[in-house]
Amino acid sequence: MVDFNQQVQNDTRAVIDEWLASQHLREGNLFVIGCSTSEIAGKHIGTAGSEELAAIVFAALEYLKSKMNIKLAFQCCEHLNRALVVEQKTMDTHKLEQVSVIPAPTAGGSMASYAYKHMKNPVVVETIQAHAGIDIGETMIGMHMKRVAIPLRFNQRKIGNARVTAARTRPKLIGGERAIYKDTAANNSCK
């Protein structure tokens, strides 16, 4: 029988494998992660945080980062107004606004706290507009997604006991029925 931590590792890797197969990520994309380790453990969000479970999820996300060359942003909990932990280089590149706080398991959440301790040059920023993301345990990442967010229907629907929702974004469709949305050699002039 597989122990719980191994099950979490297997579940997380299955989600990451689906992201890799999806072809929805491009190099340089901002990828937001909302994660309740309490929910993974089968408890109510914010009541049983675990940096041990955070470490498992973090390792899988670092693998995704290395394979796709994306930038990770770990969302803090509501006590830090859902600020995000990113690498300083990401903050500088995207001209994000830094805030002064260090996430802790009891104020920021175990996932953000773990990420802050294990990233190379972590900073906390107020907000981002991510290209894609994953919400583990209904942590509400929508406020950090670009418009228009599209939910992804992955086969792996849980990590541990937490529900998993994945999303990507696409550019807004503008122009109505006369607009062309695919690049073609067809008539591109306005009449």
Image (cartoon, grey):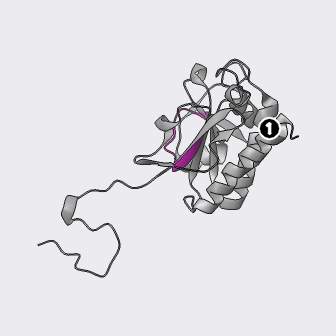
Asked whether the viewer can see residue 119, the reply is no
Residue 180 in the image, given as x and y percentages of width and height? 27, 68
Mark 1 element type? helix
Residue 48 in the image, given as x and y percentages of width and height? 74, 20
Is residue 119 rendered to the left or right of residue 132? right
Q: Nearer the viewer, residue 102 or 164?
A: 164
Snapshot quadrant of residue 12: top right
Q: Residue at x 82, y 32 (%)?
A: 52
Read off the magenta span.
124-134
Snapshot quadrant of residue 26: bottom right
**Residue that mark 1 sits on:** 55
Tell me if residue 31 is in the magenta stretch. Answer: no
Residue farthest along the front direction in this orientation: 1
Q: Of the residues shown, which amino acid type is indicated by label 1?
A: Ala
Q: Residue at x 71, y 29 (%)?
A: 37
Tell me if residue 127 is in the magenta stretch. Answer: yes
Instruction: Give the answer, above or below, for where 148 lies relative to 80.
Output: below
Snapshot quadrant of residue 70: bottom right
Q: Nearer the viewer, residue 152 or 112?
A: 152
Residue 80 in the image, given as x and y percentages of width and height? 59, 23
Residue farthest along the bottom direction in this orientation: 185
Q: Quadrant of the C terminus?
A: bottom left
Q: Residue at x 72, y 57 (%)?
A: 66
Q: Nearer the viewer, residue 21 or 133?
A: 21
